[in-house]
Amino acid sequence: MSDSDAPATPAAAQPAAGRKVLCIEDERFISELYVRVLSKSGYQVDAIADGKQALEAAETNQYDIILLDLMLPGLSGIDILRSLKDPARQPPLKAKVIVTTNLEQREDVRADIEKQADGYVVKAELTPHELARMLDDIA
Amino acid sequence: MDHLSKLRRRARLYLFGILIAENLLAVGLGWSLYTFVHLNGLISVAVSLLLGMVLTFIVADQASRYLMEPLTALWQAILHLSPTEQGVAAPKIENLRFGRELVANLSSQIYQLASVADRAAADANKEVGDMGHNFIAQNLPLPLVLLDDTETIKFANKAAADYIGLTPADLIGKNVYMVLDMSFPSADTFDSWLKTAKTASVTATKSWERVRLNVRDNHPARLFDLAAYYNHGNPDGNATMLVLFDHTKQYSQDEQAVSFIALSVHELRTPLTLLRGYIEVFEDEFGKSITDPELQSFMLKMRAMAEQLTDFVNNILNVARIDDDQLELQLQSGDWATILKSSIDLMSLRAKVRGIDLQCKIPDDLPPVGVDQLSINEVVSNIIDNAIKYSGKSKVINIDAHLTQDGMIETTVQDYGLGIPTSILPNLFTKFYRDHRNRAQIGGTGLGLYLSKAIIDAHGGHLWVRSKENEGSTFGFTLMPYAQLTETMKQGGNQEITRSAHGWIKNHSLYRR
């Protein structure tokens, strides 16, 4: 699913160049869409739908950005987030974790999640391009 | 024993001396009477016996008092200690003339015995008391947790262990925050209260509603009210006491009402995400190859409608939040011209596809306003959306911002369309209200204006409408300059201010990062 030809596209000049993104998303249409648009923007994207497999992949620590859905089969996004952002984790996770969800949380629950994650995005609120631009801004 | 035999020897010596002296006195008296007074021998004996008897009685009386002194002192000491004899003074042992050492010794033993007995009785009492407290604490049908000064759990009763889902042994000795993963509905949390209480109070009590206990292993979360008591320097080390009142059933029913909406919103958002995504991909990759202007406009309309639907979904959600008193605003200082223009930009596509021109007159020198950007964007969207829907054949909407005479920042949105009949103007901001004559022609949610009014009210502003049928409507709202808002809140500094749709809440600068 990764796009190794990224440097050939104009987008390669952007901050995306070669950065690795793990898209943890169980809605196949959405992950398809994100993989396509983010790859075109120069990211190398892997998509995994199952929570447990996704956590294993994330733990390889090879990703720069992790897009994390909350409602997942296998292991919930909250559990994945807790495990990845565990302060005792050695070595600490390199990736920035952006929670991407369409689930509406109570303010307090959302605030709890925001405290742990590096970003929180309602998928319906932004188009794939806007998402790509947002990732470009993440240092 | 030593003191006792010493005392006996002394008593024997004294009695011996007294008796000898008395006998000598009696014999001497009889002999003197017989020899010098030349009394009849018999009479002399009788007189000396009589006098001897009187003298013996006096001496015996004195001696018995003297010999009884130690016993009296001991009796007094015992009475002094007796709980039933009130007001008996302690004996003055140092004043004793006879048996002082023995009495001192014995009375000190009596006092010792008494204090041992006292202690035993007190211990027995305490044990009864502790057992009573333990019984209450242990069998209290409410979860009860005691913490020491370091927030380590010292005691958790059966109910607490059952409630948290661990054994008491698993709880005791653990830090409370490790075991009780609690979420509070606001920044006013248990740990922030405890921190303040520890620095500022000797004793403090506080209660919270709708606290959530996040239980591990996919168990449903528990919802409860929490009451806490703090006392500084408690002798048993029980600095903090927590009592939990379970309301999981009741609160989760309330939550389910919201979660039905949350679920619907989730189901709506997933296809919306995809529609907006696909539309973008199509525009991006095929946009240039579409030459048919009608198809081009279809593309734009598709995007505009997807945006409109997204806003509608958010309206549903926000109305539910307002009704549940869950909408919180973070009021921050912002440049109104910038904020308003970006909100208008988001509506430009929707105006464009209906051929409507949004004409803006927004001065750049307005004072900074105190706004929650996301919410105010919803207000602007809803009002412009409304103007677009009710524009009819008119193709211009005027948007204007200015400073009012009383220093508020007023924004007006004027359309020249259908207008609103006077009869329904008073109901315009009611939930679900819509002019039903127009229902067939014009879609509308009836939620947008209700939501806008709640948000503007929460900003401390005012939403109004002026309208004339067939001539159009003007919607206007005022916002407070940030400086005035902080003054109203009587606080300085560039802090965030949080408001709910139903009034002021509190300064909330720590709530979000």
Image (cartoon, rainbow, N blue to C red):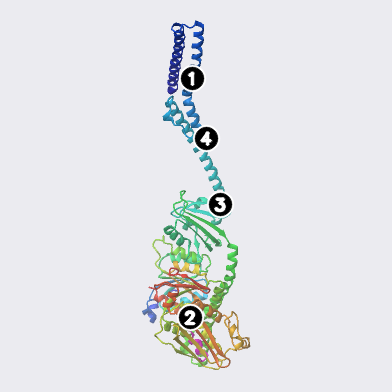
Instruction: Indicate left or right for B511 with B435 as reference.
Output: left
Identify the image quadrant of the C terminus of chain B.
Answer: bottom left
- Tell me the amino acid under the disc marked 1: Ile
Image depth: mark 4 or mark 1 in front: 1
Tag 4 and tag 1, C-beta contact below 8 Å: no
Residue at mark 4 = B82
Rate crowding at label 3 as few (under 14), some (14 to 19) or many (20 or more) other CA atoms within 10 Å: many
Question: In the rendering, at what x and y percent does residue B163 appear?
Answer: 56, 56
| C-alpha gap between disc 2 and disc 4 | 85 Å
Chain letter of mark 3 equals B
Q: Residues within 10 Å of mark 4 (few under 14, many from 20)?
A: few
Which chain does the numbered disc 1 sit on? B
Q: Residues within 10 Å of mark 2 (few under 14, many from 20)?
A: many
Q: Nearer the viewer, mark 3 or mark 4?
A: 4
**Residue B158: which numbered mark, if any?**
3
Per the model, the C-alpha gap separating discs 3 and 1 is 78 Å
B59, above or below A29, in the image: above
Of the numbered discs 3 and 1, the one sitting upstream in the chain is: 1
Q: Going from the N terminus, do you reach mark 4 or mark 1 first?
A: 1
> Marks 3 and 4: CB-CB under 8 Å?
no
In the rendered image, residues at marks 4 and 1 fall on the same chain = yes
Magenta span covers which residues? B346-356
For residue B247, which numbered disc appears in the image?
none
Total numbered labels: 4
Magenta stretch: dominant secondary structure: helix
The residue carrying mark 2 is B377
* Marks 1 and 2, how far apart at CA: 117 Å
